[in-house]
């Protein structure tokens, strides 16, 4: 068969349901082969949008999201979304067409070394040099993308190789099962926990990926241990229903005190990825005893040197550990972070300030959405508020890009979320700056019949940057811009557009938009002067890009 057909059959063999991308000259054979495939190709309006769609699809489903481009500028446009997936441990396979191997040894139109370019931001980057190697390259790309810790891989497919014939066939997909830690290590961990006077649990994205939320909750509840989650682990323990849930940490220096780290003598890290909340922020004196419970060994860091590492299946390791520990009688726990968040949200639940307070926007959003609906949060000042204040009651219902923190993820990510879970409502929560970075994908959403709500926090500035500039220098620099009329902009695509003109309009507008069964854009002015109040309550702000 033709190599391009074999390539598509290998993708089918991996269970690929969607490919997000843009056709080009150097992937013509692959595009033609896809016409006869059950795989659905989602034609996007920009390759970055395609990569972000694959990114969010991967992190929501656990199956590698797939994005495809042509060579040169098409491939370079994938980079941001691919890097985001790799740093946030979302399984993704990126594919790019490439020039014929007969002209790759010399200066040639649109030819760049894509394998080398993608290597630093992927787990695996390879070029297909022979038709017969297609099954191995594709199988390896998916195996590495989906194995712990997940991430991005890249396949470079030259156009002349795609045209060749081959007798090869897809390889069997073999699933592996994680082991559990040794009984001796589990016993040693149990002793450490029993001896601790003020243990604290820090749960991260790995627990969500492992679908271990139920065991995390059972473990924390049995031992009555206060639990802090990272941005990407929101919802592992429902916040408002459980007094052991202390809330979200990872944005502010003050989380060290308010999150309970300063008082802890033992931190039990479950599925913790270091990019989520760097240990030098919560273990600045390197005095904490640490138990690392994850699928892989801990990264080496002077502020993160675990006494014990329980590696393998997170849920099974927690089950084994819990069987060795007695039930601890529930007692009132000191929750400054939790109490401050609850008090602040209740304080603002009925406020009618204009422009709207961030707290009120989040209150109305949470009220309008069901517990299993999905919010995709973009990057900017609104991210700080969503990460801290949005009440996620279930895992993977508030998606926040936190490792790479790439702006522009919300709109394309919401499309992918709707494709993955068509029966759930999906809201893209974005600033006006992030919205405009990939707003062209509104057309994609309408064409693909993926009804989503886009909630724009409008301040006509790079608001987070202005805030930090004023805190550091007392003045701002080059952060202002003008927006189009977002209502007319939405309508020009054939979507619905709403403008909020008073604080009491947002909740009914959200409720209407969620019933519209189309793409709805809501323009909501926001007052970010409340940012300073948040830091006064919950600590000093730090850069979103943590070192």
Image (cartoon, rainbow, N blue to C red):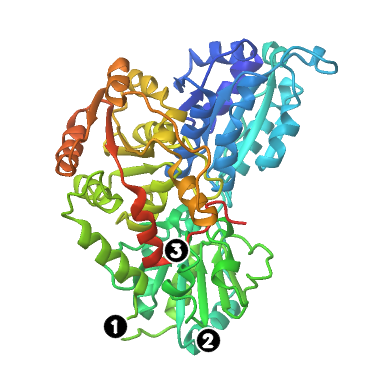
Depth check: 409 or 85 in front?
409
Q: Element at badge 1?
A: loop
Residue plotted at (51% across, 22% down): 46
Which quarter of the picture shows residue 312? bottom right
CA gap, disc 2 and disc 3 = 27 Å
Depth check: 511 or 359 in front?
359
Quadrant where the N terminus sits is top right
Q: In x, y percent, where is residue 333?
A: 33, 80
**Vertically, is 72 above or below 385?**
above
Q: Which residue does the numbered mark 3 point to in the structure image?
A: 249
Q: Which residue does the numbered mark 2 point to in the structure image?
A: 191
Q: Element at badge 3?
A: loop
Q: In x, y percent, where is residue 32?
A: 54, 10
CA gap, disc 3 and disc 1 = 21 Å
Precedes in sequence: disc 3 or disc 1:
3
Nearest-to-viewer mark from 1 and 2:
1
Assess whether mark 1 and mark 3 are in contact (beta carbons under 8 angstroms).
no
Precedes in sequence: disc 2 or disc 3:
2
Q: On the picture, is 224 further left or further right than 380?
A: left
Number of residues whose C-alpha sits closer than 10 Å to that of mark 1, classed few (under 14), some (14–19) or many (20 or more): few
Q: Which residue does the numbered mark 1 point to in the structure image?
A: 332
**Vertically, is 148 above or below 122?**
below
Residue plotted at (47% across, 44% down): 59
Q: In x, y percent, where is residue 179?
A: 57, 62
Residue plotted at (69% across, 70% down): 302
Depth check: 507 or 462 in front?
462
């Amino acid at each position: 068969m033709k190599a391009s057909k074999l390539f598509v059959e290998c993708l089918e063999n991996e269970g690929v349901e969607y490919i997000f991308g843009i056709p080009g000259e150097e992937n013509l054979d692959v595009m033609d082969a896809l016409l006869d495939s059950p795989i659905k190709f989602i034609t996007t309006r920009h390759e970055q949008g395609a990569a972000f769609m694959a990114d969010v699809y991967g992190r929501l489903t656990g199956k590698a999201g797939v994005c495809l481009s042509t060579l040169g500028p098409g491939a370079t446009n994938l980079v941001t979304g691919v890097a985001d997936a790799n740093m946030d441990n979302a399984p993704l396979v990126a594919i790019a067409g490439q020039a014929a191997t007969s002209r790759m040894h010399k200066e040639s139109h649109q030819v760049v070394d894509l394998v080398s370019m993608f290597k630093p931001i992927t787990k695996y980057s390879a070029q297909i040099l022979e038709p017969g190697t297609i099954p191995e390259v594709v199988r390896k790309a998916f195996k590495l993308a989906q194995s712990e810790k997940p991430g991005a891989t890249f396949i470079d497919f030259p156009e002349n190789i795609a045209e060749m014939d081959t007798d090869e066939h897809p390889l069997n997909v073999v699933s592996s099962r994680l082991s559990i830690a040794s009984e001796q290590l589990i016993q040693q961990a149990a002793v450490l926990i029993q001896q601790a006077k003020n243990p604290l649990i820090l749960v991260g994205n790995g627990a969500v990926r492992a679908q271990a939320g139920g065991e995390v909750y059972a473990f924390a509840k049995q031992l009555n241990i206060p639990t802090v989650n990272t941005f990407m682990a929101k919802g592992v323990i429902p916040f408002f229903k459980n007094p052991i849930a202390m809330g979200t940490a990872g944005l502010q220096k003050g989380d060290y005190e308010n999150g309970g780290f300063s008082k802890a003598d033992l931190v039990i890290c479950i599925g913790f990825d270091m990019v989520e909340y760097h240990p030098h922020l919560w273990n600045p004196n390197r005095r904490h005893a640490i138990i690392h419970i994850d699928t892989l060994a801990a990264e080496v860091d002077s502020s993160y040197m675990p006494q014990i590492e329980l590696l393998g299946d997170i849920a099974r390791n927690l089950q084994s550990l819990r069987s060795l520990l007695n039930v601890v009688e529930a007692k009132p726990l000191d929750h400054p972070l939790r109490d401050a968040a609850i008090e602040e949200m209740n304080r603002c639940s009925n406020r009618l300030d204009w422009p709207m307070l961030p707290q009120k926007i989040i209150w109305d959003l949470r009220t309008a959405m069901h517990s299993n609906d999905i919010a995709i949060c973009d990057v900017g000042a609104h991210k700080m508020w969503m990460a801290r204040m949005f009440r996620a009651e279930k895992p993977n219902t508030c998606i926040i890009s936190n490792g790479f923190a790439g702006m522009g993820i919300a709109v394309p990510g919401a499309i992918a979320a709707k494709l993955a879970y068509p029966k759930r409502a999906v809201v893209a929560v974005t600033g006006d700056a992030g919205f405009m970075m990939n707003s062209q994908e509104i057309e994609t959403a309408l064409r693909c019949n993926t009804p989503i709500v886009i909630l724009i926090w409008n301040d006509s500035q790079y608001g987070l940057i202005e805030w930090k500039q004023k805190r550091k220098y007392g003045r701002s620099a080059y952060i202002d811009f003008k927006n189009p009329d977002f209502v007319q902009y939405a309508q020009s695509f054939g979507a619905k557009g709403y403008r909020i003109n008073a604080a009491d309009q947002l909740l009914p507008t959200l409720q209407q938009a969620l019933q519209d069964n189309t793409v709805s854009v809501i323009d909501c002015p926001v007052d970010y002067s409340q940012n300073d109040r948040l830091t006064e309550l919950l600590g000093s702000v730090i850069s979103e890009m943590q070192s």
